[in-house]
Image: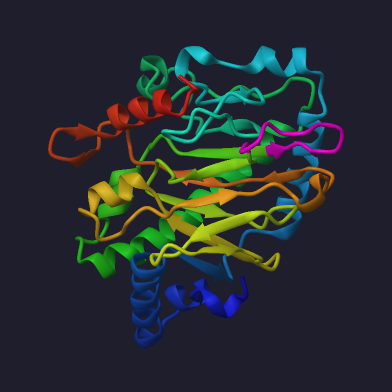
Amino acid sequence: MSRSSIPLLNLHDALCSDPDLRARFVQSLGEGLGEFGFVAIEGHGIPVDLLERAYGLAREVFSMPEEVKKCYETPSNGRQRGYTSFGIEHAKDQPMPDLKEFWHVGRNLGARHPLHLSGKVPYNRFPEEIPGFGPTFSELFSRMEGFADTLLRSLGGYLGYEQGFFTDLCRQGNSVLRVIHYPDQAGFTPVPGAVRAAAHEDINLLTVLPVSTRPGLELMTRSGEWLAVHTPPDVMLCDTGDMMSLLTKGRMPATTHRVVNPEGGSDGGRLSMPFFLHPRPDAELSPGVLAADFLKKRLKEIGVA
C-alpha cells in the first residue's frame, strides 16, 4: 500500500497552538478511522532507538529454548501476560491456529493494587534470563499508551464526547503490548490454509502498530478489498477494534486485517509489536456489557483461555 492510499496525519498538528490545524487533525482522524478503518501517523515521538532496542530483545526472548519460554505461560488467566506458545491462538470462528508465538506486556500498578490482586489486570511476567526485557518493554508500553491517549482525545472531540471521556475510560485499563514472532517457514510446510494471522478484528478500543520487521500485513477496506500495507519506519499505523465499535454503536467499526505468509516460504521470520489500548475492566461498553466480561468471552473464542 502506498502512503497516499490511506490517511497520513502528523501528530504535531494535534498538539500545536493553531486551532485550524488541530481541527483538521480531529476531522481527518475521525473520518479516516470511520471510512477507511485505519490511519497512518507520523510525528508520534516514540524514539526509533527504543523500537530497535525492543526488537533486539524480542529476538533474544524468542530464541530461548521452548521449555524455558513455556515457564512464563499462564493459561489460568487467558495468557494475558507472559508467553503464548506457537499454534495456540486462532482467529475468532477459525479453528486453524495462527503461525505465531507472542509475549504480552501490561501495566504495573504496584504489587498490592486491587486490580492486580483481583486478577482483573494480571501481573507482568518478564523473562529473568533477559534482564533488559522488562525495563525496555515497560518504557515502550508507557510511550505507546501516551501516544494512543493523545489520539483518543482527538477522536473524542470528533465523536462529540465530553473532554476527558476516553482518558477516564482507559485509566488503569487492561491494555496490552503484544510482542509477536512469526517464525521463518523455511524447513516446514504450513497446513493448507494456515497463515501467520488469519483475518480478524482486534478486541480492544484502538490499536497502535509500529513498523514490523517484515511485510505481510493486509487490511480490508470498507468495500471488502485486501490491501497490503507498507509503511516507512517513522509511521505508526492505527485501527479500531470491536470494543470501539460497540462503544460507538458502529460509528467507528472494527477493522478486519490479517498477516499473510511470505512468498517462497522464507523471510527469516517476522517480528511485530502492536499496542492494544483497553478500557478499565469495569467500563460499560454498551448497556449491560462490561469490558472485563467482553474480553473474557473473546479470549475463549480465540483459544487462549
Q: Position of residue 148 (x, y in %)?
A: 46, 55
Q: Position of residue 132 (x, y in %)?
A: 76, 33
| Residue 207, magenta (yes or no) | no
Residue 211 placement: quadrant: bottom right
Quadrant of the rendering where the C terminus is positioned = top left
Question: Position of 127 compared to 1: left or right?
Answer: right
Question: Position of 114 compared to 177: left or right?
Answer: left
Tell which residue pokes out farthest to the left in this image: 287
- Main secondary structure found in the magenta portion: loop
* Front one among 182 and 212: 182
Residue 185 placement: quadrant: top right
What residue sits 63% from the left and 59% below the top? 46
What residue sits 69% from the left and 68% below the top? 232
Q: Is residue 130 visible?
A: yes
What residue sits 77% from the left and 27% below the top? 131
What residue sits 57% from the left and 57% below the top? 218
The boundaries of the magenta stretch are 181-194
